[in-house]
Amino acid sequence: MNHVFPFVRMVLPEWFMATVHKVWTKMNDDATGHDFLHAVRVMELADEIARQLGADRSIAMTAGLLHDYYRKEEKQTGRLHYGPEAIDALRREFGPLLMPALEEVQFERVMDAIARHEWYGYKKNDEAESELSLDAQILQDADRLEAIGAVGVARTFMFGGAHGLPMAEDEAMLEAALFDPDIPPQGSVYRHFYEKLLHLAGGMHTAPGRELAAPRHQFIVLFLQQFERELALSLNA
């Protein structure tokens, strides 16, 4: 148990402490579901997936912690938190903190993973899965595990409320729903389950990711069944 920062369970290396403090200071008051606790959970999931795969754990945990660092700016300005401006800003803010503990090649692998973490295989304009590095696959799996299961449900409603989305809408709107991370949130919280969350488990890249995703996916399926019964919106009626 780490006693310096709340919610952190893994033992943090000394060279990483200043970076964690910087992220905590900025993200601890976020109310959109992309707060410090989310960053920590993605960090720890990425670290565990990397451990099981024998991948570079320093890259995995760093990318996990930093992947949503500019969410506030995205909400305020519309500039993507993983776009070129954000990646350049990450280099400026965190390069001095992380190098030379991370070699430049490792640091750039972190930047590349963050730049690609919002690519979705079901979008026709995305790159092929085979073109994603292992680092990017690990970050994607860790981040998407956070979007499903009980935590995923809670975060979805936090995100919807923060962006002024209604809880539900006419079920006919679900038929053509397809999530696009490059445009502002739209539709409803209910739609988000169908346009994105139900697709995530089937798109996991790694074996550990698929194993962790299975029970979380089943949870959101069961949640939706109950949710739809209570809203009288069952698609199977």
Image (cartoon, helix red, strand yellow):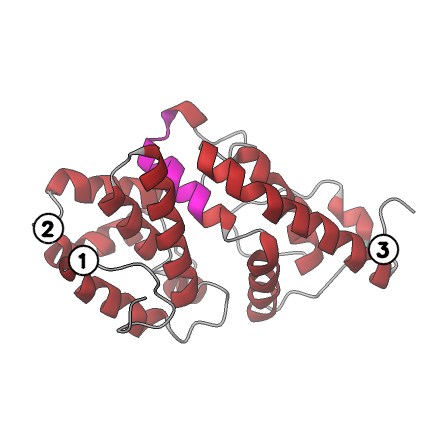
Seen in the picture, residue 2 relative to 55 is either above or below; the reply is below
Query: The magenta stretch spans which residues?
Result: 131-142
Q: Earlier in the sequence, mark 3 or mark 1?
A: 1
Q: Nearer the viewer, mark 3 or mark 1?
A: 1
The residue identified by callout 3 is 233
Q: Amino acid at mark 2?
A: Ala
Q: Looking at the image, can residue 81 be seen?
A: no
Q: Main secondary structure of the magenta part?
A: helix
Residue 156, given in percent of the width and then of the height, sits at: 59, 60
The residue that label 2 is drawn on is: 101
**113 lies left or right of 221:** left
Q: Magenta stretch containing residue 209, yes or no? A: no
Q: Where is 230 relative to 121, above or below? A: below
Q: Position of residue 114 (x, y in %)?
A: 33, 46
Q: Earlier in the sequence, mark 2 or mark 1?
A: 1
Indicate the amino acid at tag 3.
Leu
Q: Residue at x 41, y 58 (%)?
A: 41
Element type at mark 2: loop
